[in-house]
Amino acid sequence: MPLSTIFPEFKIIRDKEKCIACQVCVRQCAFEAHIYDPEKDEVYSDDSKCVGCHRCEALCPTDALNIIKYPFDIKDNKNWTPGILNDIYRQAESGAIILTGMGCDKDYPIYWDRILLNASQVTNPSIDPLREPMELRTFIGRKPRYVEVERSQERDTVKVKTQLPPQLRLETPIMFSAMSYGSISFNACQALARAAEEIGTYYNTGEGGLHPDLYKFGANTIVQVASGRFGVHPDYLNAGAAIEIKIGQGAKPGIGGHLPGEKVTEEISRTRMIPTGTDALSPAPHHDIYSIEDLRQLIYALKEATEYKKPVGVKIAAVHNVAAIATGIARAGADFITIDGLRGGTGAAPQVIRDNVGIPIELAIAVVDSRLREEGIREEVSLIAAGGFRKSSDVIKAIALGADAVYIGTAALAAMGCHVCQKCYTGKCNWGIATQDPYLSKRLNPNIAARRLVNLINAWSKELKEMLGGMGINAIESLRGNREHLRGVGLEEWELRLLGIKPAGEGW
Amino acid sequence: MEREKQVADKDYRVPSACGIFGMMSRSGRRFDGSLIIKAMANMRERSNGLGGGFAAYGIYPQYSSLYAFHLIYDNDVAKNETEKILSLYCQVEKSEPIPFRYTKRITSAPLLWRYFLSPKKNADDDRTEEDFIVDLVMLINRKIPGAFVASSGKNMGIFKGVGYPEEIGEFFRLDEYEGYIWIGHGRFPTNSVAWWGGAHPFGLLDWSVVHNGEISSYGINRRYLSANGYECTLFTDTEVIAYLVDLLVRRHQLPFELMAKVLCPPLWEEIERMPQEEAELHQNLRIVYSEALVNGPFAIIVGFKDGMLGLTDRIKLRPLVAAEDEDMLYISSEEGAIREIQPSLKRVWMPTAGEPVIGKIGATSYATEHYIS
Amino acid sequence: MERFLIIGSGPAAISAIETIRGKGSKVEITLLSEEPYIPYSRPLISYLLAGKIEEERLFYKGRDFYERYGVKAFLEEPAVEVNIREGIVYSTKGRKFTYDKLLIAAGGKPIIPAVEGKELKGVFTFTTLNDAKNIAKYLEVEKAERVLIVGGGLIGLKATEALLEWNLNITLVELADRILSLTLDKKASNILQWRLEKESVKVITSNTVQEIRGQKKVEEVSLRSGEILPCDMLIFAIGVAPSVSFLRESGVEINRGIIVNEKMETNIPNIYAAGDVVEIKNIISGKNQPIAIWPNATEGGKVAGANMLGEDKFYPGTFPMNSVEVCGIPTISMGLTEPEGNDYEVFSKEEGINYRKVILRDNRVVGAVFVGNIERAGIFCGLIKDHLDVSPFKSRLLDDDFGLIYLPREYRKRKIEEAIGL
Amino acid sequence: MKRIYIHEEYCIGCRLCEIHCIAQHSRSKKLIKAFKEEFPRPLPRLVVEESGYISFALQCRHCEDAPCLSACLTGAMYRDEKTKAVLHDKDKCVGCWMCIMVCPFGVIKRDENNKIVSKCDLCNGEEVPACVANCPNEALEYR
């Protein structure tokens, strides 16, 4: 075998004093990084197999394991870093595109960390959410411009005349983004569905279709229609509370999807309506949408199919011309637009695309919200932001920039146990999330996962309330697009301009 | 240019605390301004001398069909520019300085002028007369440096300036006017830069608004108004409320009661407890007018040609008290101010959070709580 | 107050009493026992004789059992006659015991063949505590060294194992061609015989005692084969028979044992029977027969006790099973172990002394033998009881990791639920 | 009574239950010590069954109608009056294996070192048995 120059990413440190050779690590590692030697009754490790998922570390009963970064020092070089070299070694050996999972991990500015929130002092009392009502309820869908009422003359009564187009009601402005059954396990899908139901929000099927066992969560489901049209049929469309047409994904704008045949199990084949074991290929574009008017046709086809009872939205990746594209989508009849930013996740994408295509979600929200308002059509469409939301403060800043709600993907996966090792595409997720291997997928107990998801969203919602209360606001809609409550630090003039916020230190 | 200094090209909003007062004769009887001056003086604690003002309805019966524009000019240039525009768009029936007298404390003032006019609308202009006037007001306020339209309604006027309210009242000789509704305001801004136009009440068409509070939803309310054609030039919360009232009542034709429910919507949990039809109404109002929700502490009194409305925020973070005697309805920041001018009241009550007190000329009841069957 | 009378003090009687009192009943319970002792565990006598346990441990229900359970017990006073018309039981001491309900749990009696010299000193059976005590005493007093054990069944082996601790010269004579012929299959018998022989036990099969000779005490025996074996002690261990002689005239229906239905009722109203004294349904063969095993006695007693209180409990029957350890080699057998005919499918596996065999009929387990590795043998007991179709996992039955996991999931789930009374 | 419930669909076959059961029944009750220093290592009181991707931990079901109780010759197997658990008194046990013969779950084991049987004791009054407390996936539940 010729010499491999690829060096391991991680080093497995095993404390022999503590290791009792119980082999929990051996059984837990789908990558076979731990090996038991029955002759010596000892466990040893193979660093080159370790993906850094930390499953073994988490389960080791004696804390004998510690996974650290592999110390690979080449001569200091800001240009040729070990990571870059390793990619070259890998490609030199394989001749292949480097695949990866999760969102862009490169050092682009994270504007959330450069934006600060306001709080009330003296002139305006802050509100204590533990004592006062604090409302997070959010509606996604097209809104009429005004409400017409009918007054009855004889009695001083009023009746509402305006009927609202279909709306999604969110008890908190956080939803679970599209993650297909196929990219994630059934248990993971079920956990998301159950959590969404319990919280009073929505999860998104991704383009994996809807497993029959999950139809009962339909009232909290957004069903996706993507370029592969997997699993799309009238029952599917009508099962959900809303439909999302997926044009693009932040992790891989302009790129289709590919679920390898080995992951297309019998259940998935039934759900996606494709033969077992065949690759599920989602084309890069929808081949019936080559222009905005084609999109309009699809939007209305879906509305027709669901008798105009469900909001139909469109998801796009945040790309350079996102504002103009978004207004086009709004005018094409979409009830909501989902914008997935640069750091949006994926089950599998070429690393080069993931790390180099798109724009940060912060800028995208700001320019889209502003453009929609400039064109006077903001109320015609709800704006859902996605891609890299890590904490409640990211969420509240997104809302203040102009988003109606956000989708969280990676954060939800992390709540279920994901350690962001980026190996989703291997199908060997040791945490039982991004896998169809029944041995691995049962590691995700949907009871625990749903509970943890609910906890996370409840915790974030409490934090949202705290932050709102601090700003003297008791209903989330008073913050949406209210950029007065945001200030930038360490940002250039142009960034402040695009974000539509003032620099920190400047008052009203 | 004091205003330019403040506003320049930036948003510059000054939070303030205030005393507000409103009184009206249900029967439409006109009375002079000395009573409200006295009431306002009672709440001197709530002002710091940096702003005071009054709105009065029914004071120009002889010009009741014309729009009465009260203008505040920094200089003659502004006045000339404004008058050019006024005569371009309107038939100016009368143009005169607003009478005043210097007081002990108020020894200087900007140019204060009033015009009685009717719009000259082209036949192909499909705007309503009111929209035409609104656009005109916006045009002057935005385009002419040093000019500010203080009021633009019919048979009403707003008198305001830098000083304690009772001094402003004296300055404008309000004891010489008779109106059936009077609204007063004493201001306690947190900065020291004072500008006559920045004082309350704020008015547009027949609306006048006095306000005590700081709106934490200002940013989005302003963007919402902007999308609906209202340019907020003053950067005061009061301006925002005035425009919202105009938008909701005049343009969207919502009854006052529902306008109040847009500004201060019931909690979702309250809506859920309502009968279905009522719940649907309130839900739709909240969903459609989410950006018109006025959040944060405030108490306002809105005057209009046949009545006035008092309202506090959803959780009543600012005070508001209402009272009535045989003919009069009073709304005030403090009960003491009412008793100062009318010790024998028939009823005094504290309106609950978000629940409007509405008085209309000729009507007998004020508080409208459950008007939906 | 209702009067219950119980004949016998073995596990069937004990479990009936525990059931009756466990349900809170305050009926009057009278008990007649042939034993001079409070209840004790007869199977433990071999451990006592081997010196592995103290006598005290035999009294497994505690010394105060009768007091705790409110039982008026008459010791060393077995029943001699039952008058079903009058509802009276007569005891050996001539006393009359009236009852409203009677439970016959008189157990079994060791079979002593009609051979010459069986009355000689040094001839014993091995079923009671007194047997064990007498044997021990005899060994000590008479310094007996050569022991002949007649019968290579369970009792014989238990006696053998116990006596090995005494460093004696032991000969085991078995009528069949192998030891434990009723319990084990040939292979298992061979393993155990090999093991016994390793301990210097002389095993003689296909043979039996024809005559016991001696002056006052045993001195030698002649076998059917003509062989003469000098010996100092002889233990008859050729089996037990239901102890029913006192019922011969009573009208209670008897075959080899008392005939009962699934509620443990005899043909006579208010008379119940349980334990070694009855013929119980062998659920494998479908025929009734005495099955003298401890679990059968306790289960039967439990059902009888409940039904005596007016409940409606059923005992569907059981099948023979045994656990016997010989010189450190544990064995468990159940059901049919050496089936004859073509209706059976046999799986077996052997590795050293570890031996497993499973017998199927119509894809149902009807028997199993375990030698050495007896772990999880009870699973097969369950499979026999539940009559489960094992065809889907037949090939797994002998796997080292065979367990519930190979059983159909639904069955497994139900089994677990049933266990906890769901 | 409080019982251990098995959710086999969530058993991941990690055997932490078994490892912690051993430690719990060791002298020191400490994992590392129990495994590295104590001899003989105690038997786990449960069985982890595994076949393909299915697995589950099985311990004494503490049956309502426990066959081991009926089969026990010595009174070693008894039902705890308070907890209703089926417990085993090692001082009474003679190692006759009758309980092993009748236990349909196969969860009573021979402790060859001590010539007695070994079975789940629900960790003798611990608030939560060690296997349940240490199951990382709630495949075991105590309620």
Image (cartoon, rainbow, N blue to C red):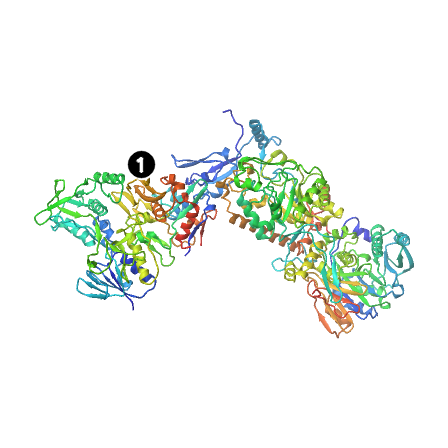
Q: Chain of mark 1?
A: C
Q: Position of residue A402 (x, y in %)?
A: 69, 48
Q: Is residue A239 visible?
A: yes
Q: Residues within 10 Å of mark 1 (few under 14, many from 20)?
A: few
Observer-nearest residue: D111 or B257?
Answer: B257
On screen, residue B91 versus residue B186, left or right, reads right
Q: Position of residue A488 (x, y in %)?
A: 69, 46
Residue A18 location, quadrant:
top left
Q: Is residue C27 above or below residue A336?
A: below
Q: Position of residue A467 (x, y in %)?
A: 64, 53
On screen, residue C217 versus residue A45, left or right, reads left
Q: Hey, which residue is sitting farthest left in the picture?
A: C215
Point 32% across, 38% down: residue: C348
Identify the secondary structure beneath mark 1: strand
Observer-nearest residue: A280 or B356?
Answer: A280
Amino acid at dot 1:
Glu
Q: Is residue A490 visible?
A: no
- The number of discs equals 1
Please give the residue where the numbered disc 1 appears in the rendered image.
C351
Point 52% across, 33% down: residue: A8
Q: Hey, which residue is sitting farthest bottom in the picture?
A: B344
Q: Is residue A227 above or below residue C250?
A: above
Q: Is residue B83 above or below residue A58?
A: below
Q: Position of residue B97 (x, y in %)?
A: 90, 60
